[in-house]
Image (spheres, grey):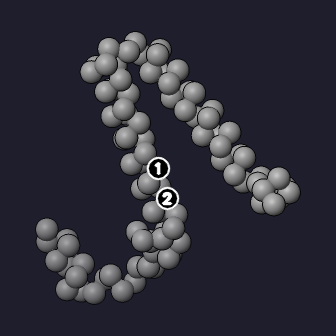
Amino acid sequence: KTDFINFISDQEWKSIEPVSSWFGPSSFLMSSMSALFQLSMWIRHCHGYLTENLGIPVWGSYAVFALATLFSGLILGLVSEAPETEWLV
């Protein structure tokens, strides 16, 4: 506590380099990291629901997530390539 008070009162904080805006809490990079961690917690919650509440075996839950990953990759791939092709026109 005393070190923190001395840090403030002696204005030692002025000699410290500020955090780059790229690594700031509200930057795109940190917001993306936060969303990734929230997604991982949601996946963990879903895995718990599938195995504990629905009684699906652990390998079955993994299979559900593997299929969801494959299908979402397929959809994202199709959507990302659609502007480059003429099949939508």
Residue 24 percent across, percent down from the top left: 44, 71
Please give the residue where the numbered disc 1 appears in the rendered image: 36
Task: Classify residue 83 by image quadrant.
Answer: bottom right
73 left or right of 36 in image: right
Q: Residue furthest front?
A: 89
Q: Could you tell me the amino acid type at mark 2?
A: Ser
Q: Residue furthest right?
A: 86
Q: Label 2 neighbourhood size at 10 Å, few (<14), some (14-19), many (20+)? A: few
Front residue of 29/49: it is 49
Residue 34 percent across, percent down from the top left: 42, 56
Front residue of 40/11: it is 40
Front residue of 62/55: it is 55
Q: Alpha carbon of mark 1 to alpha carbon of mark 2: how far?
A: 6 Å
Quarter of the figure with the N terminus: bottom left
Which residue is located at x 31 percent, y 19 percent? 54
Disc 2 secondary structure class: helix
Residue 57 percent across, percent down from the top left: 40, 12
Q: Is residue 67 above or below residue 87?
A: above
58 left or right of 87 in image: left
Which residue is located at x 82 percent, y 53 percent? 87
Residue 21: numbered disc: none
Q: Could you tell me the amino acid type at mark 1?
A: Leu
Task: Classify residue 39 by image quadrant.
Answer: top left
Please give the residue where the numbered disc 2 appears in the rendered image: 32
Q: Label 1 neighbourhood size at 10 Å, few (<14), some (14-19), many (20+)? A: few
Disc 1 secondary structure class: helix
